[in-house]
Each structure stands twice: as structure tokens, then as C-alpha cells.
Amino acid sequence: MPETAAFNPPERILMGPGPSGANPRVVRAMGAPLVGHLDPEFLKIMDSIRVMLRQVFRTQNEVSLATPGTGTSGMEAAVMNLVQPGDKVVAGVCGYFGDRIVQMAERAGGVVTRVNAPWGSPVDAGDIEKAVKATGNVKLVTVVHAETSTGVRQPIEPISKIAHDNGALLLVDCVTSLGGVPVEIDAWGADAAYSGTQKCLSAPPGVAPVTISPRAWDAIRAREVPSNTWYLDLQLLESYWDSRRAYHHTAPISMIYALHEALALVLEEGLENRWARHEKHGRALQGGLEAMGLALHADAAYRLPVLTTVRIPEGVNDMEVRGALLKRHGIEVGGGLGDLRGKVWRVGLMGESSTPGNVLLFLSALGRILREQGFKADIRGAQREAATQLS
Amino acid sequence: MPETAAFNPPERILMGPGPSGANPRVVRAMGAPLVGHLDPEFLKIMDSIRVMLRQVFRTQNEVSLATPGTGTSGMEAAVMNLVQPGDKVVAGVCGYFGDRIVQMAERAGGVVTRVNAPWGSPVDAGDIEKAVKATGNVKLVTVVHAETSTGVRQPIEPISKIAHDNGALLLVDCVTSLGGVPVEIDAWGADAAYSGTQKCLSAPPGVAPVTISPRAWDAIRAREVPSNTWYLDLQLLESYWDSRRAYHHTAPISMIYALHEALALVLEEGLENRWARHEKHGRALQGGLEAMGLALHADAAYRLPVLTTVRIPEGVNDMEVRGALLKRHGIEVGGGLGDLRGKVWRVGLMGESSTPGNVLLFLSALGRILREQGFKADIRGAQREAATQLS
């Protein structure tokens, strides 16, 4: 096949850790006529996005914008702008993405103290407090609200209090939580947060919502040396997103259209309704998986509804199961990352993908494939449990 | 209007410095079903893109990929990966984008010697040679092939020879040239080059083609400290793009679809045909503008066909003219950047926007608006000259 041949990607049921299925309205929005990045009509769309981002993040932060890259660009923008060489950082790490923040903070010249927790539990607030006090003069505490590698929800408020009581700023990774589970930037007192579009916002990946508190913004503006990154320099980005409209980069126009439509869909559904939908479907899936005889990996008290880690039973082949799900049913789920490689599957129910139909289909498909692998899956029990919770 | 209201961006004729009009096939490609970033079908699309990028860049470079951001992300990836703290860089600067490279190289810790030329001329190879020899032990020479702020084409081969004769690597910005005017990475001996999708490739902005020579790749792998950027770390990006398929970021799936279709369109048209098309339409526009009585800003011997800078005549109001073009005709052109602010218009004829119709329409529309402003535009002369060149 020549490289230029038309490609026809298959229809998938996206139940991995992201991307989730895109809403058809979002896909259609990407096809709207392309305009320039300084076109007055485009600037109006950017202004609308700022207002909607504040609503979805639950914040009054003036500095609320989208960085021109995938979710990781939001992480890098937040970390590289907040951390100056020599700054002390205390990083909560209980999974792959907490560790990624550490790597970025170190590359920015930060002196990082890691506070680890087992992959499957949240970071302990007491451990953070000890580290912050022992380190002294901490500039930034970092934490992941919804750890995509483990399916754990981190309680934010206790850590926020510790950070602020000790004069530090709090950075919260909301990549997998925004639009799916309650995110309350102002109520938490989070100083910097970012997300992706391809998780619970149900747009294709490509831009990253970011919000910065006035206090964090002061810290960024007080930098003695500019951030190493020019592309993701938040002061330059904000000078384009705010009324100055200073040219910085050529905005990813079609992806900005997608984000606008995705945020509009979130607000039309209503944040509370959307959270309830994700909660209901996630709990039905988890109930069904346990009824099937499988073990869930994340601590029960901290399980996210939007991303479930399932332990792969003894004797079951990871790749064969995921391959069969994909080939026979078009269902994508994720494998384990880092320490959990080969040990768990990651099953997402995010945004458009969070439907009752996907819960039931997945339980049915997985159950049959597991039986072929010699695992005695209780398919009927799983369906009964899930159906009860969904009704 | 509530922020969530449907937006309906108007149909524009994109004749600014980018984005150019997107080909309808590219727009349609973005609507293809979303698949995961590790889906086997998606990995095939990435492989096709690698092959096509090499054809379009005219290179055998194994490391040819797309960074997950707009053209400036390609610039940042190339600069931040090649420049280590203390590295000596000689940067040719004859416009806004040459200066942007300097800013990035300095943020990466490079010690930069600027070699300036007037905005409207290319950088003089002799000046580069003097600076390289005077500096000594230069790691990297940087130059902009098509300076989007001035419309000047930089001859690359003399500078490539100087760089290599002195043991330095050569970085070339091809944002506005790739797919529109001849780019010959291997014949030039360029060691690093990048582009954008929204210029002569005629896709929406959002990903950036990058290619790295084996020699530059050795330099990147020999770094003593990792690059400050994790998001744009080329070694991490390559470990996802090559056969290792190591998870790094969630690829901007829909934009990658767009890039695939855009590259296929370039190769279907044929690079030589495409260069000839851009050349013909650009010269017709430039001939028409001069026949109208306007002065072109860039040195005649180095004028790009894809981006033309026109001097704003005395007594003519920049914003009023651009506003009238946009409001009456839906035509976007660019204003001047930096030193040329208020002094020139930047008129692009790139990719889909490079058509005979756009040349004639623009000359007609501009001529009438200039006459209202009191400038005696020779509209008939302009049309005659352009039509002759187009025939």
C-alpha cells in the first residue's frame, strides 16, 4: 500500500485511559471553516472558552486558557513556569503521572522531594506535611487528582491546607478528572491546574486547559529568569489570550473549535449531572467486574468512577485479552503503566464513552474472553449486578 | 450571547502569513473515527507519515516525525534538544522568526552570537563565516529558510558549507517553505529542520514536521543533561514514533489524520508541480502589485513566491485597508511584525490559497480600497500584468 493511500481508521469503542470517544458535535465543530488566529471572530471564540473554562474548573481565575498541545503540554506549562532553578518542590507520587511531574520539575531545575505512596492508594497528607516541614521554604506542592495509571482519586483539600499553611503553592493535575468528577479549583485553593481534552471532556487530544490562581500568577511574574520554554511560557500565552492579543503562536484553530464545543456540551449537560452520570456508570462497571470474580486494584475508598484498574487474574494473558477485545469488538482498554505493567487493565468510562451500553457490552465481551482463557468469569452475575446499578 | 452558543466562523479567503486555506480532504480526514494513540491502525498512519515526511523534506533522515504542537513547537524541539547550556550558537537574524530562534537558544542556555541583516534581505553568508570563525567552537548555526515576517528566501547552501567546514551543525526553519518552494534537506546538508502544517501544506495548525540528521541525532544523544523540555524531548518523542512505541504523550489523533492527508495531497500533486504552482501565482501577484504602483519590500533577488511583503503607501491607513478586505471580501492578509509593524502587509499564497482566482480577486479588492484611501492604484494595469503571467 503506498503511503499516500486513503486511510480508514476503524470505528472503536474507546474504553481505555484516553482518548475517549469524541462527541459528534465536537467532530463536526472541527470541520468549521478555518479562520486566522487573530481574526475577530476567532478571538470571540477564545473569549467564550475562557469563560467556560472558569465554569468547568469552578474558578474565578482570570488566567484560564488552553495551551497548544496535548494534556502533557498543560503539565509542562504549569511546572516549567512555576519552578525556577533551585526552587524546592514536594511532589506526591502514587503513580506514573505523579512521577512525570517530578521529571519535569527536575528538568526545570527544581529540587524535588518525593512523597511516595503505593500505586493503588492516594498520597498520605501526613506524609506530605512531614516532607514540607522537613524541607522548609517549599515553593510548590504537586499532586495528581485522578491518577490515570492507578484509578485513584486523591483528596485535595488536606494537602491544599498543608501547602498554604507552609507558604507553598499547590499544583493539581486534573487531566482525567475535569468534566467527569468534581473539580473545585477555588474551593480547594488550588493554585495551578491543567487537564486534557481527550478524557472526560470528550474532544480529540490536542489542547490542554490550564488555570492559574492570582497568587501563582504573581509568582510566575516575579520570576528572575524566564522559563526555559518559550512555546509554553504562560506569560507569553496569556498576552495572546487576554485583551492584548499579542501574537505568540498560530493557535491550533480546529482544536480550539473542538474545545469550545466540548465545553459547551459539558455546560449544557450540567456539571453535576455529568458527575452523576460518570459516577453511576463507573460504579456499575466496578460492581459488575467484582461480581464477575475479578479484583479491582485501587483502594475501595478512593476509586475513581472514570478510570478503573482491574487486576489481571493469574494465568490470563494480558495481550491476548486486549487483542481479542479490540479485534472482535473494537473495544480499546489500556494496559498497565510502569510498576503495573502486565498486572492490570485500565478501563475508562469517560465523556461520551460513559454509557450504560458500554458497561454492559464490556462486561459481556470481557467475560467471554476470560472464560476462553480458563478464568471462570461469572458473566450472568456481572450483568445482573451492573444492570441493577444502572437501573 | 451565552458562551455555549454555537459558533459559526465565517468563510474566509486566507491570504495572510498562515493559516492558509485547508484542503477539503484534509478537513474531512479530521472527522475520521477517533482511535487510540497506540491502536495498531494508528501506528500504521504514523509510519506512513514518516515515509511521506522524508519525501517532502527530501531526506533520508530516519528521525522524521511530527511534534505535538504548532510550528513553533517544532522550532522549540529542534533548538532545546540541540542546545545545551554553554553551547555556542551563531544565529542568522533578518526577521522576526530568526529572532525567535535566538530567544529560544538563550533560554536553553546557549551563548548566542547574532548575525543581523536588514529586514528585507537575507543574512550574508560572509557575515556568518566571520562570526563562526571569530566565535570558535560553534555547535550550531541557525537560519530561517523562508522568513515569514519579510518574505525573504535565505540561500542555504553557502551557510551549510560554512557550518560544516567549521564543525557546526545547521538548523533551518522551513515553516513557510515546506511544500511551497524547494526544500532539499539532504542536498543542503541541513542537520535539523522543522515546519508547520498551516502554511504550504494546507492543513490546520496543530502539529509540526521535524527532521533530524544522523549527525544531529548523535549530538542529541550525547547530551550530558537532558533537555529542559520533557514534552518536546526528541529522544522521548522518537521512542514513540519508532518501532519501540513507548508511550510518551497522547498523540493529537485528528491532527495527525490531517497531516497524513495533507502530505498525501502534496505527493499526489508532485513536489515539482507544487513548487511551480506557488512560483507562478506568487510572481503574478507580485507583478500585479508593482503594476498597480505599489512597492514590494523584500530584495527582488530573494523574494519568496509564497509570502509577499508590500509596503503600505504614504497616507494609507493600515488597519482600515485590512479591515475593509476582511469585512467586504472575507480576505485576510497579515500586518507587519516587529520593525515592519504598520509598514508592510504580508500577503500569502500558500497551499490551497495559491490559486489564480485569489491573485485576481486580491488585486481587484485591494486596488479599489486603496483608491478610496486616495492612492491612485492602477487596477487595470495590475489585472493585465497578473493575467498575462497567469496565462
Image (tube, coloured by chain):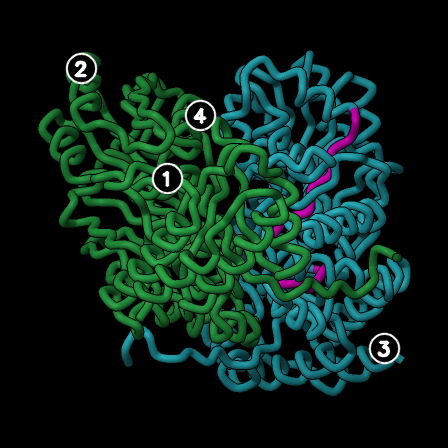
Chain colours: A cyan, B green
Closer to viewer: mark 4 or mark 1: 1
Tag 2–tag 1 contact (CB < 8 Å): no
Is-magenta flag for residue A204? Answer: yes
Q: Which of the marked residues, 2 or 1, is nearer the chain's N terminus?
A: 2
User: Badge 2 local density, few (<14 within 10 Å), some, or many (20+)?
Assistant: few
The disc placed on residue A390 is 3
Q: Is residue A276 left or right of residue A256?
A: right
Mark toward the viewer: 1 or 3: 1
Measured as percent of width and height from the top left, residue A354 is found at 74, 70
C-beta proximity under 8 Å, tags 1 and 3: no
SS for callout 2:
loop
Chain letter behind tag 2: B
- The answer to whether residue B208 of the structure is visible from this angle is no
Residue at left 77%, top 58%?
Answer: A263
Can you give x and y, in whole percent of width and height, for residue A58 in the image?
85, 45
Furthest residue in direction left, as rendered: B165
Q: Position of residue B54 (x, y in %)?
A: 25, 59
Amino acid bearing label 3:
Leu
Are callouts 3 and 2 both on one chain? no
Looking at the image, residue A31 lies above or below residue A232: below
Dot placed on the residue nearer the N-terminal end, 4 or 2 = 4
Using the image, determine if residue A84 lies above or below residue B317.
Answer: above
